[in-house]
Image: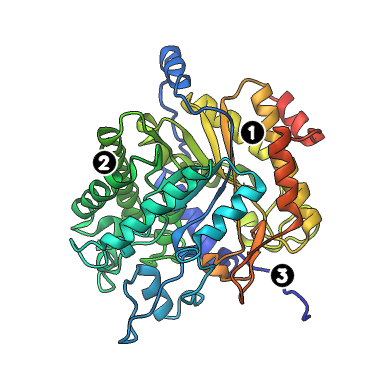
Amino acid sequence: MPTRQPLQPPATRHPLRQAVALAAAALLTGCIMYPKPPSITPQARTKASRVDTGDFAWGFSSSSWQYENRAVAKNGKLPFRTDWDILMEEGKAVPRGNTVVMSWSHFDKDVAALKKVGATHYRFSLEWARIEPRPGQYDEAAIARYVEMARRLKANGIEPVVCLWHFTFPDWLYDQENPKKSNWLHPESDARWQAYVEKVVPRLKPHVRYFAPQNEPNGQIATAYLNGQWPPVMTAALGTYAAAVRASAGQFRQAAAIIKRHRPDAVVMSVQALPWWSNGLLDPTRAAFNGMMRMNFDHLDKIWDVCDIIGFNYYYSQKAGPVAALGLGSHRGPNFTEMGWDIDPAGLYKQIRLVDKRYGKPMMITENGIATADEDQRKRYLEAHVAAIQQARQDGHDVRGYFVWSLLDNYEWHYGYTATFGLGKMNPKTYARELKPTAYTYRDIIRRGGVREIPESVRKAAKRK
């Protein structure tokens, strides 16, 4: 077996671009302004806590683009295209292929693996381009297939959590000649988004109560308009970035209203990217730190009030500032993932505490996981982050669920297939789901309802106010 090369996260392939992004975020916020939290009354906190979600959710998260296979038509063309197809055609992204982990045609194998681990919830997404390959033309068979996925999960005692958008847009919303009018900001985006949500929610509602309108819109928008790595590939486009945040938040609110109209007892969830940030070197005015906090919260501040659950994804902590940005992804050792990300379960505890204080609503950790080839490291990571949630719950923070990213090794955007987050993997010949040792660790955690020990780092974080 050849020596495994250390992975480089997307930002470290262009360190100056990351530094520009940090500076852009600081400028965007007026250089030093920390995002002012919304005003939450005690009565609102009490009302929010009453949303019924049942027992603690132990789940997995996935996405359509990263899991689903698709056939090539007889003419050699794809049955639908996304902005990421265009990015790959331009040589700006790692080729994905048409197989991935075959979840479109072998979803029953995913369900069997979920049952074997004991998952109670499963978050999967709909591929908008598959459902609406051309404007206003819907693939009814694709919608029926997604409905069947939800129905099959329910029949097997697993609660489906459906995400309506996970990073990719239909190619007809992507204007290569005018990136400022692409995706969130395409002239037809609002109308087509509303029509899409109106189309799928009534079909899903008999089997689905939990809906997440968008996955990590804050992270996607920053990567697309500040870092220049995801469609529409713009760097330090401050005004366009701000416009995309507003447009995305507006479309989230539209979706939430549609979901509640069709199913009043639905649980609407956010899914935000929230790493834990601390102040780094060469940031005396805290401009970079405040900029990163704006990236964390500007979008969520615009939608929190229409959410029943504040869901967020947590993977790592990081120091904000040009020194930390230039070194991003270069760290190695037992305290870092193979992507160079800091392993910091105490950061998860602190983020839970901050989100609780800021929004006063029930929370779920909608993604958490580690890219590593070392199963002992994966086990330690999983147990430590579950422990952080346990400590937070013991301290009165209303956390309702935990979702691992992910069930299977899959296509990880700019990392391609080299970043292995899965608690299982697909056998490429039989398509069987082969579970890794940590999957059984997670099974035992679910059966016990938690872990036996809380790490000292988490205990110390809990003591600090």
Q: Which of 361 and 423 is in front in this view?
A: 423
Q: What element carries label 2?
A: helix
In this picture, residue 211 sits left or right of residue 54: left
Q: What element carries label 3?
A: loop
Instruction: Indicate which disc residue 350 carries.
Output: 1
Cα distance in 3D space between marks 3 and 2? 42 Å
In this picture, residue 166 sits left or right of residue 242: right
Sequence-wise, the earlier of marks 1 and 3 is 3
Q: Where is residue 87 in the image (x, y as percent from the top left)?
A: 40, 74
In this picture, residue 185 sits left or right of residue 371: left
Instruction: Indicate which disc residue 6 carries.
Output: 3
Please tell me whether mark 1 or mark 2 is closer to you in this view.
2
Answer yes or no: do the residues labelled 3 and 2 have beta carbons within 8 Å? no
Please tell me whether mark 3 or mark 2 is closer to you in this view.
2
Cα distance in 3D space between marks 1 and 3? 29 Å
At label 2, the amino acid type is: Gln
Q: Examine the image and state in which quarter residue 92 appears.
A: bottom left
At label 1, the amino acid type is: Lys
From the image, which quarter does the C terminus lie in? top right
Q: Which residue is rendered at x = 46% and y = 32% of the image?
A: 309
Sequence-wise, the earlier of marks 3 and 2 is 3
Q: Which of 240 and 175 is in front in this view?
A: 175
